[in-house]
Image (tube, rainbow, N blue to C red):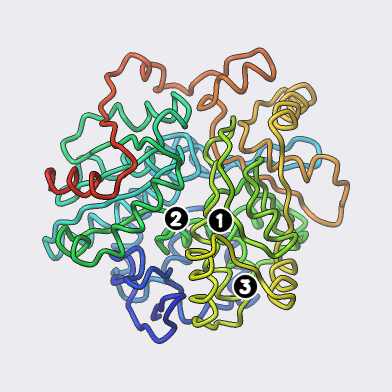
């Protein structure tokens, strides 16, 4: 299995190469040369596997000979030891909607499912060559905490996390900034998540800097994150869909990685009827899917802050497919975005996008109303991101398909929104109650590439 860049399809790299690089040096994202096609025998066998076993089978398809089989199994089993639910992923049935609980990990968000595996993979590979790396990542709220938990205290790894100052929830911030580990550095940037993300991308593209510090990244652009997310599409289909109906999946979407994993699952042979890209009022993806124009606007702060994004990094991966694997066309579109502030898909490209994805957006008032409706009807509390994804399924009575809604974060991470909606403060799970009394450690920096560079260089 070799990998190439969306901006240069002639690239030929191993999984280990692209795992450490994260982002291609040309600014593109990595993709595998092919997607394994699963036959009926393999799919039938999947129905007998638990989450860890299924993870092993799917990771093995994409990691080639990077890990010995027993090493890969140990990596996966170790990664999921700290999850509060032995199933790793569970489902709550609320009428016709099956809420997929992806928040049983150590930082109460779906990012843990991939990040814990990445942490163990980095540790395994670094132990063999004694390299030291510096991970730099941007977060809109959940990636940072998941990455810090996965990498804190690990040998030969420093992790720098950029988050938008005062633009994530208090619980999200505290889950990042209360770790007392010498290899963890939290940076609050005076700007938006998109500003944080741009700084990280610019650091990757700066070859002198990225090579000097041996830089790597664990944002959703890292292909290993996508592999881990593919797993739970297969898992919910076989474990929580007894009649093996086609499935509709609505996904709270910011950087496009989680819903893109569903697209890959479908390409591999999973019976997915529709993938719904669900956003809040920062709905660049809905606008693009409906009209074909990808045009970032000013970010509006919301009660679903992890979706307050106008540049969805993983969208470039689907672009590569809908332009018929033409890296020259991808480069043209990305140049248009950089130079003109937008790009426009042609009619054929838009049709392909619409054939693979549906879209939905949700206002603040609608989000609060949906949280209240689910609570009043089923005595079940969902977080505001999940509520945006529930919207297109709430009154969909299509009984031919099984309706799944990804529950990407625990409601206790967003107490202000929940209290505003249902007048109840959601409780933190056992073990998290003392987070409010812990000391926070983070530094506030201007929205400046050079200042972030200097900060990192002082600490590596």
Judging by the rendered image, the residue that carries numbered circle 1 is 256
User: x, y percentage for residue 160?
Assistant: 26, 44
Say left or right for 93 vs 2.
right
Say left or right for 1 vs 295.
left
Residue plotted at (34% across, 44% down): 147
Residue plotted at (40% across, 50% down): 197
Image position of 42 with respect to 257: above or below: below
Judging by the rendered image, the residue that carries numbered circle 2 is 220
Considering the image in quadrants, where does the N terminus appear? Answer: bottom left
User: x, y percentage for residue 345?
Assistant: 66, 71
Q: Secondary structure at mark 2?
A: loop
Say left or right for 407 vs 61.
right
Image position of 331 with respect to 316: above or below: below
Residue plotted at (71% across, 45% down): 361
Q: Mark 2 to mark 1: distance in Å?
A: 8 Å
Mark 3 or mark 1, earlier in chain:
1
Judging by the rendered image, the residue that carries numbered circle 3 is 267
Mark 2 or mark 3, earlier in chain:
2
């Amino acid at each position: 299995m070799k990998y190439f860049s969306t901006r240069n399809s002639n690239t030929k790299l191993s999984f280990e190469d692209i795992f450490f690089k994260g982002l291609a040096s040309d600014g593109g994202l990595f993709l595998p040369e092919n997607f394994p096609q699963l036959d009926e025998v393999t799919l039938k066998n999947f129905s007998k596997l638990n989450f860890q076993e299924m993870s092993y089978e799917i990771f093995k398809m994409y990691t080639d000979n990077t890990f010995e089989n027993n090493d890969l199994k140990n990596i996966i089993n170790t990664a999921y030891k700290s999850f509060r639910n032995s199933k790793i992923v569970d489902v709550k049935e609320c009428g016709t909607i099956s809420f997929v609980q992806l928040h049983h990990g150590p930082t109460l968000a779906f990012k843990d499912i991939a990040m814990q595996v990445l942490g163990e993979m980095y540790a395994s590979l670094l132990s063999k060559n004694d390299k030291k790396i510096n991970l730099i990542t941007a977060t809109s709220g959940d990636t940072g905490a998941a990455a810090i938990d996965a990498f804190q205290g690990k040998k030969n790894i420093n992790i720098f996390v950029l988050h938008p100052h005062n633009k994530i929830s208090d619980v999200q911030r505290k889950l990042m900034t209360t770790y007392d580990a010498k290899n963890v550095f939290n940076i609050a940037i005076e700007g938006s998540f998109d500003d944080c993300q741009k700084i990280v991308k610019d650091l990757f593209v700066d070859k002198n800097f990225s090579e000097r510090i041996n830089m790597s990244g664990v944002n959703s652009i890292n292909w290993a994150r996508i592999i881990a997310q593919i797993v739970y599409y297969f898992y919910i289909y076989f474990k929580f869909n007894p009649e093996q109906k086609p499935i509709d999946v609505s996904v709270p979407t910011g950087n496009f990685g989680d819903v893109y994993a569903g697209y890959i699952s479908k390409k591999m042979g999973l019976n997915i009827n529709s993938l719904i890209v669900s956003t809040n009022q920062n709905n660049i993806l809905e606008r693009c899917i409906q009209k074909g124009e990808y045009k970032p606007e000013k970010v509006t702060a919301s009660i679903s802050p992890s979706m307050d994004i106008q540049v969805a990094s993983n969208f470039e991966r689907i672009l590569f497919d809908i332009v018929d694997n033409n890296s020259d066309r991808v480069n043209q579109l990305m140049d248009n975005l950089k130079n003109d502030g937008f790009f426009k898909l042609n009619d054929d490209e838009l049709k392909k996008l619409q054939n693979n994805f549906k879209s939905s957006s949700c206002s603040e008032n609608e989000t609060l109303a949906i949280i209240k409706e689910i609570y009043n009807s089923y005595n079940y509390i969902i977080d505001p991101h999940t509520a945006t994804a529930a919207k297109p399924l709430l009154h969909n009575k299509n009984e031919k398909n099984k309706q799944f809604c990804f529950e990407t974060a625990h409601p206790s991470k967003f107490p202000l929104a929940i209290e505003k909606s249902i007048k109840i403060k959601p409780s933190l799970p056992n073990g998290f109650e003392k987070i409010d009394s812990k000391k926070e450690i983070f530094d506030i920096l201007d929205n400046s590439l050079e200042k972030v560079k200097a900060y990192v260089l002082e600490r590596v």
